Image (cartoon, rainbow, N blue to C red):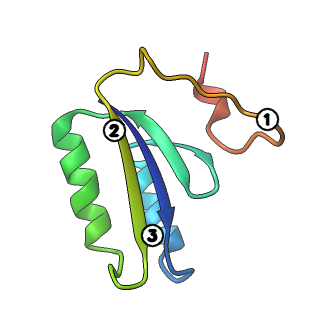
Amino acid sequence: MYVILVYDVNVNRVNKVLKVARKYLHWVQNSVLEGELTEARYRKLKAELLAIINEKEDSLLFYTFNTRKYTSREAIGVKKGGEEWIL
């Protein structure tokens, strides 16, 4: 599946969330990561992030697609991390 993760977490947890998320997904912009994951790796990512965040203060948004075939992305302006992996 193709996953886009968008997060908004307390500044004290940003580095921890980013470190975990980058084990699974590619960082593309501040607080945004994306990539292909198996269902098992998706569940593992969510479990690791839930162990870090405070659900009363932080938020995670997961957009999931069965395939990337019908998605497109247009980047305008400053390119942030992760752009180099796209061929």
Mark 2, other Cα within 10 Å: few <14 / some 14–19 / many ≥20: some
The disc at residue 76 is 1
The disc at residue 64 is 2
Q: Say which label, 1 or 3, has the lower sequence index.
A: 3
Query: In the structure shown, which secondary structural element does the residue marked by tag 2 occupy?
Result: strand
Q: Residue at x 47, y 77 (%)?
A: 13
User: In this image, 75 relative to 26: left or right?
Assistant: right
Labelled pair 3, 2 in contact (Cβ < 8 Å): no
Splitting the image into 4 quarters, where does residue 31 fall?
bottom right
Query: In the structure shown, which secondary structural element does the residue marked by tag 1 occupy?
Result: loop
The amino acid sitting under disc 3 is: Lys
Residue 50 higher or lower than 43, as above or below:
below
Q: Residue at x 42, y 83 (%)?
A: 57
- Who is closer to the viewer here, 80 or 57? 57
Mark 1, other Cα within 10 Å: few <14 / some 14–19 / many ≥20: few
Closer to the observer: label 3 or label 2?
Answer: 2
Q: Residue at x 37, y 50 (%)?
A: 62
Q: CA distance from mark 3 to mark 2?
A: 22 Å
The amino acid sitting under disc 2 is: Thr
User: In this image, 28 relative to 50: left or right?
Assistant: right
Q: Among all residues in the image, which is located at the extreme left?
A: 40
User: In this image, 2 relative to 13: left or right?
Assistant: left
Q: Tell me the residue that label 3 is attached to.
A: 16
